[in-house]
Image (cartoon, rainbow, N blue to C red):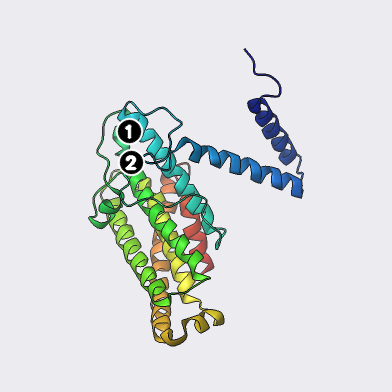
């Protein structure tokens, strides 16, 4: 039985088709932009409405998973949303993240091989796997990198309204330490795995997060200097560190770019994830 013409589903479908047709014809207007924004908010709201962001406390609209595979599918979907949200933020800095942070006690996705084959897998804790350098699957590595990238994006957002400057600089140092440890672990893993290109996404996200932090703290504006007041020594220390670390990181990304080029030459560009692009662009701009 077909739904009535005025049913919400029919209205939504008609609106999507109209917006798509307008975009194909090159229409640009404030009204069209507003309509797209409202649709985006509605669609993103559907993600939160299902309760995927908090399966312990939020009311779950979707049926409770009966199997590990169903639970893993939901976990991977939410992680993909978070990853895209953080990556998009890199191109639109100093704007709030659309998706909230990940709790430290959240589980990472299991191994990709078990997921592809429909088998069971162990799901390591997010923070524990980072601190203990636990070997996880490529997608889980990308989730770890996206988690730290989200913290770097929030740190950049907080930079405009600094209150506790000493804590802010200490947080930057902690994030940089965690990111460098993670990207080193992933880069070393890439040397021994059968398919190193599966770790490109995680490495690209790590490099992008480090580039964001170094750029933030190597270029200090006058108003930031005034905000620091008596802690100018700490500000200079962080700035010198960021500038020196920038040079080392750029060299690392150049090496990463060579790996990407070699892979494209031998295997084509189809398996190169979009998450590497920002790190290449930022390094070239720097």
Judged left or right of residue 7, residue 108 is left
Crowd band around label 1 with a 10 angstrom C-alpha radius: few (<14), some (14–19), many (20+): some
In the image, is residue 133 above or below residue 17?
below
Q: Residue at x 25, y 49 (%)?
A: 192
- Under tag 2, what secondary structure? loop
Q: Which residue is drawn at 63% across and 27% down?
A: 9
Judged left or right of residue 24, residue 270 is left
| Most foreground residue, 210 or 5 | 5
In the image, is residue 250 above or below residue 119?
below
Judged left or right of residue 68, residue 268 is right
Would you say residue 221 is visible in this rendering?
no
| Image coordinates for residue 262, horizontal then vertical, percent | 41, 51
| Most foreground residue, 3 or 176 | 3
Q: Quadrant of residue 177?
A: bottom left
Q: In which quarter of the image is residue 186?
A: bottom left
Would you say residue 52 is visible in this rendering?
yes
What residue did someone put label 1 on?
Answer: 115
| Image coordinates for residue 169, horizontal then vertical, percent | 40, 74
In the image, is residue 47 above or below residue 133?
above
Assess whether mark 2 and mark 1 are in contact (beta carbons under 8 angstroms): yes
Pick whichever of labels 1 and 2 is earlier in the sequence: 2
Specify the quadrant that holds the N terminus: top right
| Image coordinates for residue 195, horizontal then vertical, percent | 32, 44
In the image, is residue 48 above or below residue 105?
above
Q: Distance between the residues labelled 1 and 2?
A: 9 Å
| Most foreground residue, 43 or 76 | 43
- Under tag 1, what secondary structure? helix
What residue did someone put label 2 on?
Answer: 109
Q: Residue at x 31, y 56 (%)?
A: 187
């Amino acid at each position: 039985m077909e739904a009535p013409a005025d049913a919400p589903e029919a209205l939504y479908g008609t609106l999507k088709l109209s917006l798509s047709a307008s975009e194909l014809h090159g229409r640009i207007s404030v009204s069209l932009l507003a309509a797209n924004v409202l649709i985006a908010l509605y669609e993103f709201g559907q993600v939160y409405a299902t309760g995927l962001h908090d399966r312990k406390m939020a009311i779950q609209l979707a049926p409770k998973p009966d199997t590990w595979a169903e639970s893993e599918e939901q976990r991977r979907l939410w992680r993909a949303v978070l990853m895209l949200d953080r990556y998009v933020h890199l191109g639109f800095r100093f704007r709030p993240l659309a998706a909230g942070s990940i709790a430290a006690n959240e589980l990472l996705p299991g191994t990709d091989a078990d997921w592809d084959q429909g088998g069971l897998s162990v799901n390591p804790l997010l923070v524990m796997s980072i601190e203990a350098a636990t070997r996880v699957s490529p997608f889980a590595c990308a989730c770890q990198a996206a988690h730290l990238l989200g913290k770097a994006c929030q740190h950049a957002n907080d930079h405009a309204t600094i209150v506790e400057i000493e804590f802010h600089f200490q947080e930057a140092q902690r994030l940089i330490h965690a990111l460098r440890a993670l990207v080193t672990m992933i880069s070393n893993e890439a040397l021994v795995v059968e398919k190193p290109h599966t770790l490109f996404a995680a490495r690209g996200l790590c490099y992008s997060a480090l580039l964001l932090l170094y750029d933030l703290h190597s270029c200090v504006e006058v108003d930031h200097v005034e905000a620091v007041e008596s802690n100018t020594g700490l500000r200079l220390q962080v700035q010198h560190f960021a500038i020196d670390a920038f040079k080392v990181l750029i060299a690392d990304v150049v090496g990463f770019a060579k790996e990407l080029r070699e892979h494209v030459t031998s295997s084509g560009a189809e398996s190169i994830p979009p998450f590497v692009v920002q790190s290449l662009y930022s390094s070239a701009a720097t």
